[in-house]
Amino acid sequence: MLEHGYIQIYTGDGKGKTTASLGLALRALGHGWNVLIIQFTKGDSATSYGEIVSASKFLPNLDVKQFGMDRVVYSHNICMEDYKEAKKGWECAKEAINSGKYQLVILDEINICIAMNMLKVSEVKDVLLSKPESLEIVLTGRYAHPELKALAHLVTEMQPVKHYFDVGVMARQGIEY
């Protein structure tokens, strides 16, 4: 396990933030780590995300927990239930971070929750600053807050160059979910 865990952020408008974090999770699992992925703003029971199916079938050291409604959250459709789900996810994250159970915690789409004022950046920052020394934490999602970028040890900005969505190809099972 790690002597010193870092804070990583995958952000930007390009595709691949969650995918990159899943690759990191797979790598960590290969070394016997316990990994938790908390998915904020993702609660689509009609569409099984491949990572959830894989975790339950093949990866006993991987826990995936979803907190969100069964739709994408935008500023024009956000509702009180979205705030409640984000808070529940954040409570779960705080407990997990301090539990000592995990070596890697991925907070998928937490940056969106902060950008949309569903979570307070000051609260997230406080928890990150007091995280256990050996714990690696990854934050994903567009619009990473400047204070969190300054705090992180690694920040990757995904930039779109070309995407098949632009010509009408929607999310595909096994690739985007």
Image (cartoon, rainbow, N blue to C red):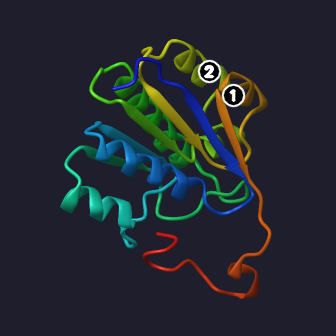
x and y, in percent, of residue 83 in the image: 55, 41
Q: How many marks?
A: 2
The amino acid type of the residue labelled 2 equals: Lys
Q: Is residue 51 above or below residue 177?
A: above
**25 horizontally vs 144: left or right:** left
**78 horizontally vs 32: left or right:** right
Residue 49, image quadrant: bottom left
Camera-side residue of 26 and 74: 26
x and y, in percent, of residue 98 in the image: 36, 19
Camera-side residue of 7 and 144: 7
**157 horizontally vs 87: left or right:** right
x and y, in percent, of residue 96 in the image: 35, 28
Residue at the spot 46% in from the left edge and 54% down from the top edge? 23
Camera-side residue of 152 and 168: 152
CA separation in Å, label 2 and label 1: 7 Å
Per the rendering, the mark at residue 125 is 2
Q: Is residue 142 above or below residue 58?
A: above
Per the rendering, the mark at residue 73 is none
Residue at the spot 32% in from the left edge and 59% down from the top edge? 52
x and y, in percent, of residue 114 in the image: 66, 37
Residue at the spot 42% in from the left edge and 24% down from the top edge? 135
Q: Is residue 74 above or below residue 124?
A: below
Question: Upstream in the sequence, badge 2 or badge 1?
Answer: 2
**Label 2 SS:** helix
- Tell me whether the residue at label 2 lies in contact with that at label 1, contact meaning CB atoms closer than 8 angstroms: yes
Q: Is residue 146 above or below residue 68?
A: above
The amino acid type of the residue labelled 1 equals: Leu
- Specify few, some or many for label 1: CA neighbours under 10 Å numbering under 14, 14-19, or 20 or more: many
Quadrant assignment for the N terminus: top left
* Residue labelled with disc 1: 148
